[in-house]
Amino acid sequence: MSSLQEIELAIGGLSPQDRVKLVQDLPSLLPEWEGEMSWARIINDPTPNTALSQLVDEVDAAQGQNPETFSPQLARSF
């Protein structure tokens, strides 16, 4: 049995509460995921975020008016 299979079996045996705790603790266990998980929480959060929406609208408008001021590298990161 591989280590991955052992981990999968162990996770499968966790209670629902322990699974939630594991998901919350994953960023500390796998720091390379922290940024990805943070963005996923922001993107999937159903709570309206007026300030974030306004900022995105303002950046979109500025980019549309003056696209040469925006870095191609920045655009690729999204």
Image (spheres, rainbow, N blue to C red):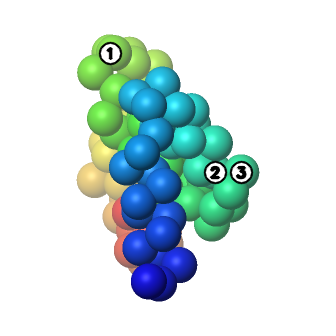
Q: Is residue 70 visible?
A: no
- What residue would you read off at disc 1? 48
Quadrant assignment for the N terminus: bottom left
The residue that appears at 48% across and 55% down in the rendered structure is: 10
Q: Amino acid at mark 2?
A: Pro
Q: Looking at the picture, tell me which residue is in the foreground, 25 or 74.
A: 25
For the residues bearing labels 2 and 1, Cβ distance under 8 angstroms: no
Q: Is residue 50 above or below residue 25?
A: above
Q: Is residue 71 above or below residue 27?
A: below
- What residue would you read off at disc 2? 27
Q: Does dot 1 land on a helix, a strand or a loop?
A: loop
For the residues bearing labels 3 and 2, Cβ distance under 8 angstroms: yes
* Relative horizontal placement of residue 64, taking residue 2 as reference (left or right): left
Compare marks 2 and 1 and give the one earlier in the sequence.
2
Q: Residue 68, percent across and down?
A: 41, 70
The residue that appears at 40% across and 28% down in the rendered structure is: 16
